[in-house]
Structures are given as structure tokens and as C-alpha cells.
Amino acid sequence: MLFELRQYRVRPGCRDDLVRLMEEVVIPFQASKGMVVVGSFVAVDDPDLYVWIRRFEDEEERQRLYAAVYESERWKEEIAPLIGPLLDRERMVVTRLRPTSKSVVR
């Protein structure tokens, strides 16, 4: 199992807009392509932090699903232009994780 922890820094005052876009458009679209979103979070003490986690069987599945999502016309023409203005992309952090043997998240 492979997890992807995605930490997004949102432009000031835009977090609610990003959360709405993620929950109403991005996550459902990605799920329709086969992605598994384990969780979606906002930081309690940081108004500009949004975090979400995706799960993949392995690196091959991750690459296949990336292509299905990010190379699609809908993503490129409709969804990506909505996300860009909300994010501070230079501060975005994506970390790939493998669960340890004692992890309850697998």
C-alpha cells in the first residue's frame, strides 16, 4: 500500500472555497477515475492549510491513476483552472508514505 499526503497552502481567505471545490468537484472526479481519498482535513490553528490523503495499491497504480486524472480533458480544461488561483503552489508539499506494520491505516 502507498499513501500520498498532500499539504496545500491556500491563498489568504480562500480555504473555504478550496474545501468546497475539493469536496464537490475534485474528490468526486478523482474517485470516478479510481482514486481512493482516505481523508480531507483543514488545520485547526492554521487558516491557510488544507491536507488530504490518497491511497494506492502501489506505484504502478499511482502512475496509471495520475494519467487518468491529470491527462483528461475535463481536468485540464475545467477543473485545473479553478484550483490554480486558490493555491500557493510554491508551498505545496506532497509526501509518499508506506504504512508500518503496526499502522491501523492500510
Image (tube, grey):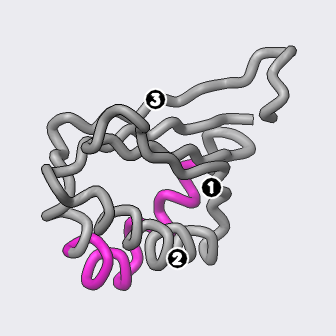
Q: Which residues are magenta?
A: 62-81
Give me the disc on residue 91. Answer: none
Magenta stretch, main secondary structure, is helix
- Given contact means CB atoms under 8 Å apart, are the residues at marks 1 and 2 in contact? no
* Residue under pointer 3: 95
Task: Choose the circle earlier in sequence order: 1 or 3.
Answer: 1
* Label 3 SS: strand
* Label 1 SS: strand
Question: In the rendered view, would you say 64 is above or below 45?
Answer: below
Foreground: disc 1 or disc 3: 1
Question: In the rendered view, would you say 89 is above or below 31?
Answer: above
Position of 84 with respect to 101 (left or right) is left
Residue 75 drawn in magenta: yes
Label 1 – label 3 distance at C-alpha: 15 Å
Give me the disc on residue 29. Answer: 2
Label 1 – label 2 distance at C-alpha: 11 Å
> Residue 81 location in percent, x, y?
20, 74
Residue 12 drawn in magenta: no
Classify residue 94 by image quadrant: top left
Give the residue type at disc 3.
Thr
* Residue under pointer 1: 37
